[in-house]
């Protein structure tokens, strides 16, 4: 029992199959668009997250560089102060050395052994000269 299909029925079935396929294709296309849109949104979110991290890293880099610059400045100040103090000490070294030389020369001129150190020794020296021994 084979049923004969008329040309009109055949065209109707073909049209129906074409519409079903078209609906499937539309649905697949819509699903694909939604999937692409979701992927695109996820990519945008990741890019925004990376940009935020990059901005945070830039700020952290700026903070680190600021600390480094401060350390270099402190080192420069300390070095400068050290050099100033060293220079001052070197400039003062000659006058102090010269004063010490003058003091040593004056001490050499004074006959320490002939000069009594205390009043008692002066008095004893006087009496010894006068032959007044007590």
Image (tube, rainbow, N blue to C red):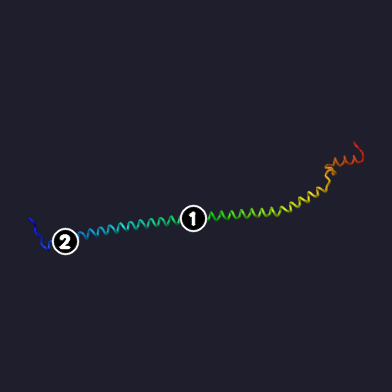
Q: Position of residue 54 (x, y in %)?
A: 44, 56
Secondary-structure class at tag 1: helix
Q: Identify the residue shown where x is 28% and y is 58%.
A: 32
In this rendering, is residue 25 above or below 125? Answer: below
Q: Residue furthest right?
A: 131
Which part of the image, by quadrant, shows the N terminus?
Answer: bottom left
Q: CA distance from mark 1 to mark 2?
A: 68 Å
Secondary-structure class at tag 2: helix
Q: Position of residue 60 (x, y in %)?
A: 48, 54
Q: Position of residue 6 (x, y in %)?
A: 10, 62
Residue identified by numbered label 1? 61
Which part of the image, by quadrant, shows the C terminus?
Answer: top right
**In front: 1, or 27?**
1
**Pointer 1 with pointer 2, Cβ within 8 A:** no
Badge 2 crowding class, 10 Å Cα cut-off, few under 14, some 14 to 19, many 20 or more, is few
Q: Is residue 86 left or right of residue 20?
A: right
Q: Position of residue 110 (x, y in %)?
A: 83, 47
Q: Residue furthest top?
A: 134
Badge 1 crowding class, 10 Å Cα cut-off, few under 14, some 14 to 19, many 20 or more, is few
Q: Earlier in the sequence, mark 1 or mark 2?
A: 2
Q: Identify the residue shown where x is 24% and y is 59%.
A: 25
Q: Identify the residue shown where x is 64% and y is 54%.
A: 83
**How many callouts does the rendering have?**
2
Marking on residue 14: 2
């Amino acid at each position: 029992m084979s049923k004969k299909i008329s040309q009109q029925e055949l065209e109707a079935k073909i049209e129906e199959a074409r519409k079903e396929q078209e609906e499937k294709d539309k649905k697949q296309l819509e699903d694909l668009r939604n999937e692409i849109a979701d992927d695109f949104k996820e990519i945008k979110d990741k890019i925004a997250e990376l940009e935020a991290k990059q901005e945070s890293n830039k700020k952290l880099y700026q903070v680190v560089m600021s600390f480094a610059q401060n350390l270099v400045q402190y080192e420069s100040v300390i070095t400068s102060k050290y050099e100033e103090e060293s220079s001052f000490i070197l400039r003062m070294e000659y006058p102090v050395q010269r004063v010490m030389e003058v003091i040593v020369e004056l001490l050499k001129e004074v006959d320490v052994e002939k000069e009594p150190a205390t009043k008692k020794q002066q008095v004893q020296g006087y009496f010894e000269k006068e032959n007044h021994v007590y």
